[in-house]
Amino acid sequence: MKPFIYPSSMETARALILHLIKIMIDEPGKTFNFAFSGGSTPALMFDLWANEYSDITPWTRMRVYFVDERCVPPENSDSNYGMMRSLLVGVVPIPYENVFRIKGEERPEKEAVRYSRMVENNVAMKDGWPVFDVVLLGAGGDGHTSSIFPGQESLLSSDKIYEVSYNPNNGQKRIAMTGCPIINAQRVIFLITGKSKADVVEEMCTSGDTGPAAYIAHHAENVELFLDDYAASKIDEEEISD
Ligand SMILES: O=C1O[C@H](COP(=O)(O)O)[C@@H](O)[C@H](O)[C@H]1O
């Protein structure tokens, strides 16, 4: 696990954007399949990306998938796609056909199957699982990642690519990328900022699969942590670098 730690959430987001752009620029002939999480943390990153780094991003070589979605229409403020559309993909010159949204307004069970099939047809497969170039994850203060919450650990070993889950705090249905496609990605990158996430980051960096985010951090091959000083306040950077 490789930690990258910056003094503020803005500097962390900027460093991650440059990291993703470099990954694409280093392989000029390739189209990249990136799966993005939603929530409040990446919103800052999407905003900065559109406003400061759009000109240097090879948009036509980037395909955007979603790690998870709340089962609401795009106009709802909870929609991960809606948030990304207003801050990033609706603003920058990425081709419309490169953005593969999860339809939160459809029947969740049917949409999880449709989206899983669409991913199978568009992303290279290995051993029955898609291999995304990057899966970008966040983590909740309760240890959830994707939309896999504590108590829903069976989704970590599901034989499906996406499944229906729910937010135990309000019962809202979600569609979540499951554990195996996350673990099989070329790179798993966590973007985590803020003091309220320091305990989760500590759990991710110590042994014991205490929750979904810690499980992924321990079981994925190539994990990078983009953190601000607050989120990293309970870890020892030297001890976790590999
Ligand atoms: O509900 C969600 O939560 C996690 C963490 O979100 P944040 O708001 O604390 O940054 C996120 O990774 C996930 O995509 C989202 O649906």
Image (tube, rainbow, N blue to C red):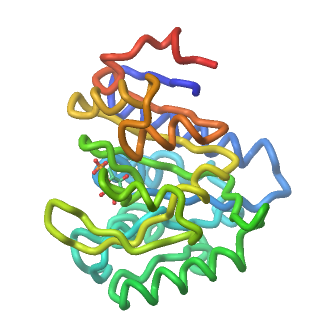
Residue at the limit of the structure toward the right, as seen here: 29
> Which of 241 and 86 lies nearest the eye of the viewer?
241
> Which of 171 and 53 lies nearest the eye of the viewer?
171
Q: Quadrant of residue 95?
A: bottom right
With 9 as the anchor, is 58 left or right in this view? right
Count of marks overlaid on the render: 0
Q: Position of residue 181 (x, y in %)?
A: 61, 59
The residue shown at (42%, 83%) is 103
Residue at the limit of the structure toward the left, as seen here: 170
Which quarter of the image is occupied by the C terminus? Answer: top right
The residue shown at (30%, 71%) is 79
Q: Quadrant of residue 88?
A: bottom left
Which quarter of the image is occupied by the N terminus? Answer: top right
With 82 as the anchor, is 177 left or right in this view? right
Eyeballing the image, is 221 above or below 93? above
Eyeballing the image, is 218 above or below 46? above
Eyeballing the image, is 195 above or below 43? above
Q: Quadrant of residue 223?
A: top right
The residue shown at (53%, 58%) is 157
Eyeballing the image, is 210 above or below 91? above
> Which of 109 and 192 lies nearest the eye of the viewer?
109
The residue shown at (67%, 52%) is 184
Q: Position of residue 85 (x, y in %)?
A: 40, 70
Q: Position of residue 77 (x, y in %)?
A: 21, 70
